[in-house]
Image (cartoon, rainbow, N blue to C red):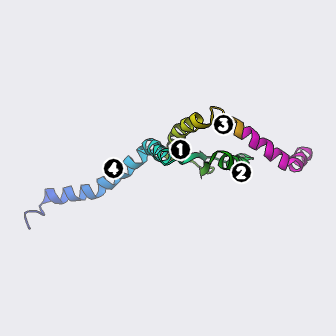
Amino acid sequence: MRKFFNRRNVLLILVAIVVLPLLAAVSWLESAPLRGRWAAHSDLAHGDYKVLGYGLPPAGVREYRKLLQERYGIEYRQVAFCTVGPYTRAYVDAYDAVSAVAIEATFGSDIFKKSWEEADRQFREKHKVDIQNVSHSE
């Protein structure tokens, strides 16, 4: 046992204890785009259509989410709000790049634009009085 705990082996064990978790963490973060693409392919293979979003959601996002879900069976999921890290952004962008292609191939290339325009129109009609009050108060 004494031969195993020589200076070199102890140093190697300490380096492994410190360095390996750091390498694992960095690898996990750097693999965000790869994991995003993989997750999208996995969801699509199971028939789950999803779109991920980040950042401050614009007015009308509730109507947009509801319209996508009810009309097309597409889930809109907000994964981050105002503060978005680069790895979250990379994951979401990679996920959406894969899922958007499949969704557009299934439902049409202008599905997101038309759905957003309709959701925005619904929002404006629902909140017409509120919007007018804001514009008059300025």
Give the mark nearest the N terminus, 3 or 1: 1
Frontmost of labels 1 and 4 is: 1
What is the number of the mark on residue 135? none
Q: Give residue 43's position: percent from left, percent from top.
A: 49, 48
Give the mark nearest the N terminus, 2 or 4: 4
Please tell me whether residue 121 belongs to the stretch shown in magenta.
Answer: yes
Q: Mark 2 points at which residue?
A: 62
Vertically, is 33 above or below 109? below
Give the mark nearest the N terminus, 1 or 4: 4
Q: Name the residue under label 1.
A: 92
Who's the residue at 11% across and 61% down the image?
6
Crowd rating for badge 4 (residues with CA inside 10 Å; few <14, some 14–19, many 20+): few
What is the number of the mark on residue 111? 3
Please say if the residues under marks 3 and 4 sit with CB atoms less than 8 Å apart: no
Please say if the residues under marks 3 and 1 sit with CB atoms less than 8 Å apart: no
**CA gap, disc 2 and disc 1:** 19 Å
**Between 89 and 37, which is closer to the camera in this rendering?**
37
Left or right of 18? Residue 67 is right
Q: Give residue 125's position: percent from left, percent from top.
A: 85, 46
Give the magenta-colored segment's residue range. Answer: 116-138
Amino acid type, residue under disc 4 in the picture: Leu
Amino acid type, residue under disc 1 in the picture: Val
**CA gap, disc 3 and disc 1:** 19 Å
**CA gap, disc 1 and disc 4:** 23 Å
Q: Name the residue under label 4.
A: 23
Amino acid type, residue under disc 3 in the picture: Ile
**CA gap, disc 3 and disc 4:** 41 Å
